[in-house]
Amino acid sequence: MGFAIGVDVGGTFTDVVLRRPSGTVTVAKCLSTHDDPIAGIVTGVTRVLSGLDPALVTRVVHATTLATNAVLERKGVRVAFVTTRGFRSVVPLGRYARVEEDRYDLRFTPPPPPVEPGDCFEVTERISARGQVLTPLDEGSVRLAAAEIARRGITSAAVCLLHSYAEPAHERRVAAILRELVPNVVASSEVWPEIREYERATTTIMSAYVGPFMASYLSRLEDALAALGVRAPVHVMESGGGVMSARLAARRAVATIESGPAAGVLAAASTGRSTGIADVISFDMGGTTAKACVVRGGRPEITHEFHVGGKGSFGGRRAGTGVPIRTPAIDLAEVGAGGGSVAWIDAAGALRVGPHSAGSSPGPACYGLGGGEPTVTDANLVLGYLGSASIPLSPPLAGKALDRLAEPLGVSRAEAAHAVHAIVSAAMAAAVHVVTVQRGIDPRGFALVAFGGAGPMHAARVAGRFGIGRVVVPEHCGVASAAGLLRGELSTDRVLTRLDAGDPEAILAALASAAAADLGVSPGEPGVRVERSVDARFLGQSHDLTVAWEPSREAVEARFFSRYAQVYGIEQRGEVELVGYRVRVTLAAPPEPPAEPPAEPPPGGSPRSRLAYFAELGGYAGTPVHTRATLGLLPRLPGPAIVEDAESTIVVPPGWTALLGPGRAVHLVAASEEAPGA
């Protein structure tokens, strides 16, 4: 096994992790460069390669929010939408669900559609839902549409013909004709051939929208790494937790829209396995957002539809408020609360935190880079929780920023800082609420795995709100997402809707062969894992549930009944029909090398101490400050206490105890919880 590099570009920091064949890691954390993310990546990679031959690197895995940001900021390319005659208004009409702040707004204006109505084109053809040709394709109408698209200077087109999942011949021919004049053409039958016309259309449009952007970015990234001497293949984290080649990511850019958050969940699942805890809640707090996800039995929850740019209550993105994407993605909730979130006072005089973030430029006031607005990081520095970071911090600048809140609120600087800390903790708890309580899951049976630059400072407070008695903070928690990238395995998904299919085994075998071809392997090769599942529903119902496939129809129906009861809370029986078929092919990664044991800390000496604010103690108190290494010398460390890492800081509040557990993970255990063995 050679050297491997994981790169995670966040809203505030770019994290780079280099794993050596021995299992030891070198990390770099540098400010993200939003004008050109590649510049920040090059800086980080250069740091971790210091003194190392770049040619030794055999693998680079990248997680990026590039596609997400392109959709949210509407910075993708102009797209033409081509569909069956009579259906050009499917996308402009769309659908929209009002959430609380919109419901009574008499001047409410829905967001613009992903494609302008004038850029929607029709061609003459019609296929039935069973794949029968009702109206032959008129190629003349296709050539007229292609000529008009080219005349307008549109360089990307999305083709989504009615029921093309059942018979793609017309759609493939339309795409072939369009490619004579349009450089980038994406067909729904190539991206995600599944029922539901609007969702299939928006998924195809988003792939055409961000595809050229992603292809250009990955090409420039490979060139930049090659200039450093790193010529290893670049892989990209996909939304579902696997990784794909840069070539495949450029072709299926829509599969990378949730690339960024997925890596952190893999890191949390790995931490749970290494510490013997199968059920965990992943809690990732970075500089801009906080994300939560449930991991049960060592595997994260997967959804087959999510919404980009949507909004909703308490961390959930409500269906109908954004652009629906039909592709597998790790099911998580996200809130605009991070270390860079700006605290402000609204018109009514109430203190608010986020969703606006100071990001990396100008960053929190304490960075000394020109920022003056108070942020969560500034509040944590004033409270004494932060003592150091990957860049120098200025307590006077943080205090000056917090005074902008304290004076109008009529409170002390420390009280204002504590209020900011409490408000952002409550906001992040909302994300945990969405993935647990809101879905009928009791979070008290889970451990909270906290990571990200700011997560361990807030984790115990968030856990306490739900009665969660154990928090686990993995080693290198500040760059856990970048480390999680190296645990991803090459994989790809295929799906197909077939109504009244006669032989499911034949469909699944064909999907497996096509997916394996994407990876350059065959389904029967050693190390190739094929997972098969089907979408089932009661006859006459509209929506379906995904269950694992078994050749026995009775076994599939039993799984469907069980899943139905789990999701809807009622036991029901009836005739079941299969409507969709799914395959995930994974090329198993080589086993991770065992990590070298860390150097023993020097014996003796007393821990450092500094003043930190704890409301339970009525204000500031002298608080012992340990490192992960010195914590290992103690049987347990009662709170209040602080454990400093190279990339993050762990706060142990009163009523909690810290100890070093398996895998050098720090366990925070509530007084009501029995501590795990170290």
Image: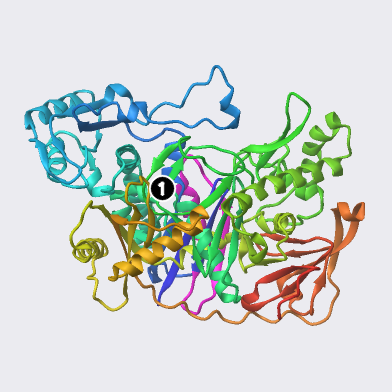
The one of 410 and 166 positioned closer to us in this rendering: 166
Residue 43 visible in the current orientation: no
**What kind of element bears circle 1?**
loop
User: Which kind of residue does numbered mark 1 sit on?
Assistant: Glu
Residue 156 visible in the current orientation: yes
| Residue 146, x across and y down, in percent | 15, 29
| Residue 145, x across and y down, in percent | 16, 27
| Residue 77, x across and y down, in percent | 33, 34
Quick check: 408 above or below 230? above
Quick check: 400 above or below 606? above
Quarter of the image where one finds residue 276: bottom right
Decide: few, some or many residues near mark 1? Use Cα within 10 Å; few <14, some 14-19, many ≥20: some
Q: Quick check: is 576 in the magenta stretch?
A: no
Q: Quadrant of the N terminus?
A: bottom left
The one of 453 and 110 positioned closer to us in this rendering: 110
Question: Seen in the image, is 612 located left or right of residue 102?
Answer: right
The one of 381 and 620 positioned closer to us in this rendering: 620
The one of 190 and 56 positioned closer to us in this rendering: 190
Residue beneath the point at 70% across and 62% down: 468
Q: Which residue is mark 1?
A: 305
Residue beneath the point at 75% across and 55% down: 386
Query: From which residue to which does the magenta span run?
Result: 19-47
Question: Seen in the image, is 42 located left or right of residue 165?
Answer: right
Q: Quadrant of the C terminus?
A: bottom right
Q: Quick check: is 29 in the magenta stretch?
A: yes
Residue beneath the point at 86% across and 44% down: 414
| Residue 120, x across and y down, in percent | 26, 27
